[in-house]
Amino acid sequence: MSLHNKALVVYPHAHANRLESIREYAATQAIELFEFTTEEFFSQPGRCLDQTDHVVILADDEDMTEHVNLAKTLNFSLGVIPLNPRSRLHKWFNIPTQPEEALQLAFSSDSTALDIMRCNEQVVLGMLMLGETPFLDQRSKTYLNRRSSLWQLLLYRLALVWSSLRNLLNIKPFAVTLTTGREVTLKTAITGLVAIENDINCAAARLINTSLSAQDGKISTVLIAPKSISEYLGFLVTAILRGEAGVKRLPRALSYIKSQYLKIESSRPLSYFIDGRKHEASCIELQLYPGAVRLNAGPIVQAGQNGSTQVKDTMKVDNLPLNETRLNMIQHHLPLFTRALEDDFKDLFLLLRDNAQAHSHYIALMVLSVIVASLGLFLSSAAVIIGAMVLAPLMAPIISLAMGLLRGDRLLLQRSLATIGIGVLLALTTASLIALLIPIDKITPEMAGRLHPNLLDLGVAVASGIAGGYAHARESVMKSLPGVAIAVALVPPLSVAGIGIGWWQWEVFSGAMLLFLTNLVGIALSAALTFLVLGYAPLVKAKRGLAISAALLAAVAVPLTIAFSDMQDRWQIERDLTREPFSIHGKSMSMIGPQVTRQGEVIVIRGDLVAEQPILLADLRALKTRLEMHWQRPVMLELNTRIRMRPTSQN
């Protein structure tokens, strides 16, 4: 590396003791030094520069701006020796932390022409920050110490989470007008902005899926513009999880502009920070001067670029709120969920209003699906029942009901309830007639599976409602609706309820009808919540409908909870029966395939009791007594006794 043979050394008077090491290095390299204090140099820079056009400065972050500004004006080259080993100058200009290496770089004759960004005529070395910029401010001690240990990294991330969530509900977008060097004007609202100059490895740079360079002739600006609190939280989670790694796709709350010039205008004064120093203005102009300063920097890290100047501006602004309706939605405060615009739900509303009507094809498909389901139930054929699920049109008016509840649309509510009521009456009537025509009154396994709903069935209904609401809101996934219909199975329980009417059996009707109501309420509530999250109604407007749905869900959940508790109790009894053999009167007996039911307080146990010796009536009575003492409840046994004969051992 070639070195200058003459150089000015400019130093703060308080750090004159740092000159000794510089003098020793200059003496070994035969470099002639001209020493000036910072005050002397700035008072008469022209006279000082008569000696040489290379200046080595001892500076910190705060002092560097004035030196760069003067170097641009008087066209001299700069070598930098940071006074603080933790100075950001090391990172910005890749200056070595080892004193010997830093001196060698400072006196090198190979200077790099660096771009200079000015903000309202003030030099920006690292970055400019405006508004709320979570995870992007890297001046704190927790950030600087984050790599020293795992504990410091955890402390840094906890500090980030706390500082970001502390003012979450108070974040307010502010209206700005952005103008680029290509005379592109955007009227939008943002919560924060970061303009990057030399700090190309900062947290903000890692949140955009593009390459940056300190010598590309452009200002890289990251705009934070969430349209809801949930979107803002998504941005925070992305920033936390990605850590030191970059992202593959631009987060929804971020936009990105790369231009040589950017003007930010607002109707009120804006507070902003240039390399940590606070300023205030209602108009902020960012201007880049390519190759304006010659500075001895280390190899500038360029993310995937060779540092060539780009001619075209980069505008990734699809995530910016530009629509006037959208701006009105967020100008006072961020909503909890991103609100859908009228253009977004116009087609959906037309579809849901049509689905709420009891068309002739709805009636035909309803009758046909019940016929197929009823026959499949008598045949105990799962394949036939699945076919009936696909045919059933009941899902559509239930989704319309969900939207009506959410938005308080009385007409949509009335029509969807009427259509659902017509479908239920058709199903019960058709299934009861089929039960009367078929001379079989045996409950098949497929029927029995729909007589005892519990909380697990409610979980299926809720998940299916979310899927159904999302599929209606997103046209690209509408093809998934048959799968949703199969998952929730609306028609089979209605058919079983109709069969219960035909047989005049209350237990069959009530159990199956409870399952249908579970599905109906679960789908309606979860689909309404899905539409709320997708932004099809404000939370204030949706409160009443959601409260009604939640009340109905709570009412349905009571018997389901009791049924779930009963099922859990029966599973526990079955585990107790099969855990280990019973020893009765010296005989070892094992219970095989027990089935437990309840008749009031009586536990009914059916299954096979196996032993290697004949099982007598006295043995069964002793077993019954032991079980009653163990569970403190009466027990009824309906058991098949079997004798196990092991192979005769061969001599």
Image (cartoon, grey):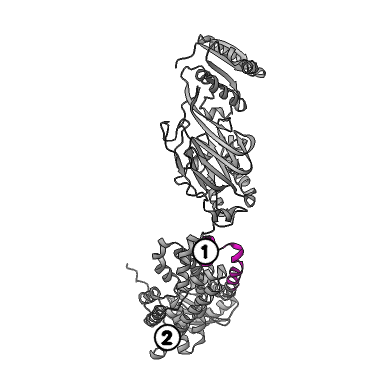
Answer left or right for 474 relative to 63: left
Q: At which x and y percent is residue 511?
A: 51, 80
Which residue is label 2 attached to? 430
Residue density around tag 1, few if under 14, some if 14–19, many if 20 or more, within 10 Å: many
Magenta part of the protein: which range? 526-551
Which residue type carries mark 1?
A: Phe
- Disc number lying in front (1 or 2): 1
Q: Nearer the viewer, residue 360 or 500?
A: 360
Q: CA distance from mark 1 to mark 2?
A: 34 Å
Q: At which x and y percent is residue 345?
A: 48, 63
Q: Nearer the viewer, residue 338 or 116?
A: 116
In this view, the residue farthest toward the right is 14
Was residue 150 drawn as part of the magenta stretch in this picture? no
Determine if residue 52 is in view.
Answer: yes
Q: At which x and y percent is residue 421?
A: 50, 80
Mark sitting earlier along the chain (1/2): 2
Q: Is residue 511 above or below residue 201?
A: below
Which residue type carries mark 2?
A: Thr
Which residue is label 1 attached to? 531
